[in-house]
Each structure stands twice: as structure tokens, then as C-alpha cells.
Amino acid sequence: MAKYKRILLKLSGEVFGGQQKYGIDIEVLTVLAQEIKTIKKLGVDVAIVVGGGNIFRGVSGAVKGIDRATGDYMGMLATVINSLALQDALEKAGVPSRVQTAISMQSVAEPFIRRRAIRHMEKGRVVILAAGTGNPYFSTDTTAALRAAELDVDLVLKATKVGGVYDKDPMLHKDAKKYKKISYMAMIQRRLRVMDTTAASLCMENKIPILVLNLTQKGNIRKAVLGKDVGTIVVDEDA
């Protein structure tokens, strides 16, 4: 039986790009859809917040000379492209889904309406949340924390390449230590960069645990919702 009844999965744009980290890798989407299908069979409600870094990233665009707000809006549109691709993969896997966007574009997706999103999940549909918060200067991590609070989720699943929270970058330091459990405040104070400060603070204020895990390892999402030991859990110090 699942430990968590409603989860929010945060997917970075790089996940969609596969090994190349840009564009959309259809094979990755197919595998991801199957992983989500396994947890749907457990009766878990699923919402997904999608990034767009595989297509365009607002911050890097600003560095190259594009106005930051304009770049962020371009990044939001990139998340819609990824969301539609994920919806297609889920539907082909037999998982009903709906895309909701923070920027109105009714020809391709529904607008984000909290009560409607909850109703979709209650009816067994996966809700894919695109276009961030609809505002520039906010990351998709912050979107994930905000939507998690709005949709009353039990757990935020944050997919990373390294599969947990470390005291330093494990890609650069072989002696990096992985935490099994860490508090929100410790993560913020040590600037571990798993999620940005705004996102971590939102989760802390609303007491929403964050589980950081490696999405590429088959079965990790299922293990997470069953409450098994996987990745790093971020909770209150007294939890």
C-alpha cells in the first residue's frame, strides 16, 4: 500500500533531453510514462511540474543579452512543449492526463484552476502543470512548491541526476557525503542547491516533505511512494 496518496513530481527540462540534455528524447518519455503508470496502479494521485531547460532557459538567455523577463516567458512556453509531449506519452501508455497552464492558451491546454486540477486527480487523471507560475523571476522549483501547497500533496518528488542530497557536488568530489535525511533549514543554510531558497521555504512553511531521487533508476518512483529507503528526504528538524 502506498505511503503517500498524492504526490507532485518535479521534472527538469534536462530529463526530457535524455543523454543529449536538449530537445525531446521520445524513449525517455516512454520510460517515464511507464514509471508513472506503475504508481497510478497503486491508486496514487499524481501532479507533475515540468521544466523547459532542454529547449530554453530564461537565466542563460538573460546572460546572452535577452531581457530576463522576456527570457523567462520564453522558458515558460518551452515547458508547455514538454508538457504536451509528456501528455502524449502518458496517453499512449493508457494513462489519462490533462495539461494545465499558468498562461492562458486554451487551444492547447486548460488554464490552471486549483479545484479542477484536484478533480482531475480524484478521477484518476495525471495533471501536468506547465508555464511555471505565469510570472517571470520564479523558477519551476518554486512552481512545484507552490502547486504542491495548493493541491494538498503529501510529497514532492524532485528528480536529479545524482539521486540525493550531498554535502558537496558529487560530480566534482568523489568524497561527497550523501544525506539520507536533512532538514529544510540545513539545506537552505548550507546552500546545497537542490531547490532554490524560495521553493525550499515554501515547502518548509507548509510542511511538505521533499524527496530527492534519481529518476533514471527503474522503480525509484514506486519505491518512493511506498515509503521505501530511496534518495534523500527533506523534512522538518523535529520530524
Image (spheres, rainbow, N blue to C red):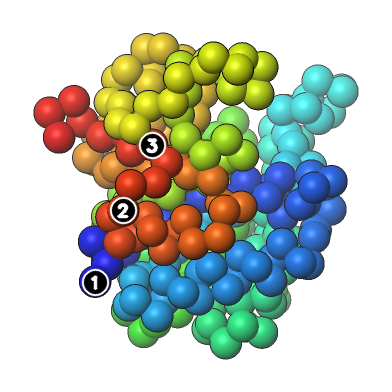
Q: How many marks?
A: 3
Q: Quadrant of residue 227?
A: bottom left
- Residue at point 45% right, 59% down? 221
Q: Is residue 182 above or below residue 102?
A: above
Q: Which residue is mark 1?
A: 1
Could you give the CA–CA distance between mark 3 and mark 1, rounded to whole angstroms? 21 Å
Q: Which residue is mark 3?
A: 232
Give the image location of residue 136, x and y in percent.
61, 36
Q: Is residue 128 above or below residue 215?
A: below
- Residue at point 36% right, 84% down? 123
Tell which circle, 2 or 1, labels the residue nearer the N-terminal end: 1
Q: Which residue is mark 2?
A: 228
Tell which circle, 3 or 1, labels the residue nearer the N-terminal end: 1
Could you give the CA–CA distance between mark 2 and mark 3, rounded to whole angstroms? 11 Å
User: Along the horizontal axis of the image, is 103 left or right of 113?
Assistant: right
- Is residue 133 visible to us here? no
- Residue at point 55% right, 60% down? 218
Could you give the CA–CA distance between mark 2 and mark 1, rounded to whole angstroms? 11 Å
Question: Viewer-proximal residue, 128 or 172?
Answer: 172
Give the image location of residue 31, x and y in percent.
65, 68
The amino acid type, in three-letter code, at marker 2 is: Lys
Question: Viewer-proximal residue, 132 or 135?
Answer: 132
Question: Viewer-proximal residue, 51 or 107?
Answer: 51
The amino acid type, in three-letter code, at marker 1 is: Met
Q: Secondary structure at mark 2?
A: loop
Q: Quadrant of residue 58?
A: top right
User: Along the horizontal axis of the image, is 93 left or right of 213?
Assistant: right
Q: Secondary structure at mark 3?
A: strand
